Amino acid sequence: MLMHNTALAFKGEYDDEVPVSSVEVVEANVAALRDGLNEVKKDVKSLLERIDRNFERLSTLMESRFDATNARIDSTNQEVNQLARTLIRTDSKLNAVLWVFAVLGALIPIGFSVGKALHWF
């Protein structure tokens, strides 16, 4: 009873404390807290394992998507290179046709001039 009265005497200083009735009650409370803490540890461990599994799964998924994206980029690069080669061939052919028209455009007036000079026309 002395302990109980002492705890009540310091009520103003220690408002968050409760009077202790016996050591057995304290031990029971500590055991209950320990059990609760063990459950929390198990839950945390389980959550960490789930996080690790999800991370591995997401990592694998991202790698496969990166590989697929890289394959599409490589395919697009090949198509762009093929288009560039086709453009270069078309440009070369266009230049050749323009040279032919330029030469004909220059030769025709010269031919008419020579023909008139030689009275062929």
Image (spheres, rainbow, N blue to C red):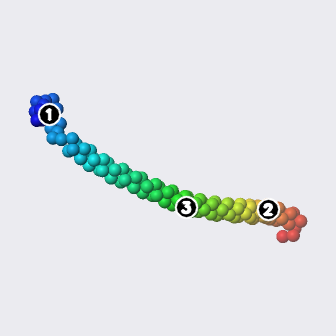
Residue found at the very far bottom of the displayed protein: 121
Q: Determine the residue positioned at 14% across, 33% down.
A: 3
Location of mark 2 (residue): 103
Image location of residue 67, percent across then percent down: 58, 60
Q: CA distance from mark 1 to mark 3?
A: 69 Å
Q: Is residue 9 left or right of residue 96?
A: left
Residue linked to disc 1? 3
CA gap between label 2 and label 1 equals: 122 Å
Q: Which residue is mark 3?
A: 64
Q: Residues within 10 Å of mark 3 (few under 14, many from 20)?
A: few
Residue type, numbered disc 3: Ser
Which structural element holds mark 3? Answer: helix
Badge 2: how crowded within 10 Å, few (<14), some, or many (20+)? few
Residue sitting at x 76%, y 63%: 96
The mark that comes first in sequence, 1 or 3, is 1
Q: Which three-letter amino acid code belongs to the residue tagged 2?
A: Val
Q: Amino acid at mark 1?
A: Met
- Depth check: give the residue in front, 110 or 103: 103
Identify the image quadrant of residue 14: top left
Q: Is residue 75 left or right of residue 113?
A: left
Mark 2 vs mark 1, foreground winner is 1
Under circle 2, the secondary element is: helix
